[in-house]
Image: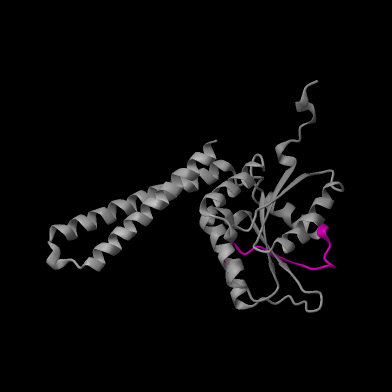
């Protein structure tokens, strides 16, 4: 029997990736969303949790980001970043910076920031730092607390998918971002080499050992970035 008869049309899919540094917070939203899967006949919902990137090596970050996006065929419709309704701590900041660095600003139209409220202290007001973070990711956010119906959140996510006309963040998009970074690193390497050659041509009297050490250190760092970029490109092509 032809299995395609039972396949779900892509326009009826909703692929979600839950992000954040706090694994407990992620589980607290993932489970209620998955419970909605059985109740919604209009969408096939898939959900993947992205491990906290700040606890991974750069190589593992590449593997995990690729895994999450590739599991969401044809791509991710919404990345959900969940944070507590409190001052953003250093771990949350670092995690969100990594997400933006890996996925670039092209992720912004696919981001929904969820703010998990404390049942004993609920407010619709955001502190200045949280507002700034939300704006850096495109501005979409939603408060969530034990009384909030998950169905309300799902309606917000549906609205996002519709606003994006079903366009998702695909593995191809991820590869394009990586190639753009690689080209920038290569250009940076050429500029460092050119500056080093220019300084050496002027003779040691004009160049301090500290400056040369700094340049060579920068050269090694850029080489490492290029190597990691190429490593990531190899992963994404497998």
Q: Is residue 168 visible?
A: no
Does the magenta run of residues contain 149? Answer: yes
When asked about the image quadrant of residue 192, the answer is bottom left
Q: Please state the total of marks drawn on the protein image.
A: 0
**Residue at left offset 70%, top offset 73%:** 85
Q: Residue furthest right?
A: 39
- In the figure, 133 relative to 62: above or below? below
Identify the residue at horizontal 78%, vertical 61% (top origin): 28
The residue shown at (67%, 45%) is 166
Residue 34 position within the rendered picture, expressed as x and y whole percent measured from the top left? 80, 51
The stretch drawn in magenta includes residue 11: no
Report the front residue among 59 and 113. 59
66, above or below 151, in the image: above
Of residue 140 and residue 54, the one placed in the foreground of this image is: 54
Quarter residue 83 falls in: bottom right
Q: Give left or right: position of 185 versus 20.
A: left
Res. 3 in view: yes
Identify the residue at image location x=69%, y=54%.
Answer: 160
- Classify residue 86 as left or right of residue 188: right
Q: Which residues are magenta?
A: 136-151
User: Residue 231 location, x and y as percent?
Assistant: 47, 44
Q: Position of residue 21 (x, y in %)?
A: 64, 63
Q: Position of residue 22 (x, y in %)?
A: 68, 64
When the figure is inspected, residue 53 is found, relative to residue 64, above or below; the finding is below
Quarter of the image with the C terminus is top right
Determine which quarter of the picture holds residue 118: bottom right
């Amino acid at each position: 029997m032809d299995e395609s008869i039972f396949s779900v049309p892509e326009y009826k899919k909703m692929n979600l990736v839950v992000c954040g540094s706090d694994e407990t917070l992620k589980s607290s939203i993932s489970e209620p969303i998955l419970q909605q899967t059985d109740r919604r006949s209009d969408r096939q919902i898939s959900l993947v949790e992205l491990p906290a990137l700040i606890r991974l090596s750069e190589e593992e970050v590449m593997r995990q980001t690729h895994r999450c996006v590739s599991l969401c065929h044809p791509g991710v419709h919404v990345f959900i970043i969940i944070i507590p309704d409190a001052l953003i701590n250093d771990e949350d900041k670092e995690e969100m910076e990594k997400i933006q660095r890996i996925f670039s600003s092209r992720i912004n139209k696919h981001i929904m920031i969820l703010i998990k409220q404390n049942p004993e202290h609920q407010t619709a007001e955001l502190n200045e730092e949280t507002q700034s973070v939300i704006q850096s990711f495109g501005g979409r956010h939603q408060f969530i607390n034990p009384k909030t119906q998950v169905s309300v959140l799902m309606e917000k996510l549906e609205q996002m998918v519709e606003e994006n006309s079903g366009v998702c963040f695909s593995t191809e998009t991820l590869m394009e971002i990586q190639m753009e970074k690689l080209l920038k690193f290569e250009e940076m390497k050429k500029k460092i080499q050119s500056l080093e050659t220019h300084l050496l041509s002027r003779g040691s009297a004009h160049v301090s050992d500290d400056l040369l050490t700094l340049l060579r250190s920068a050269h090694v760092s850029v080489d490492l970035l290029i190597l990691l970029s190429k490593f990531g490109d190899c992963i994404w092509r497998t």
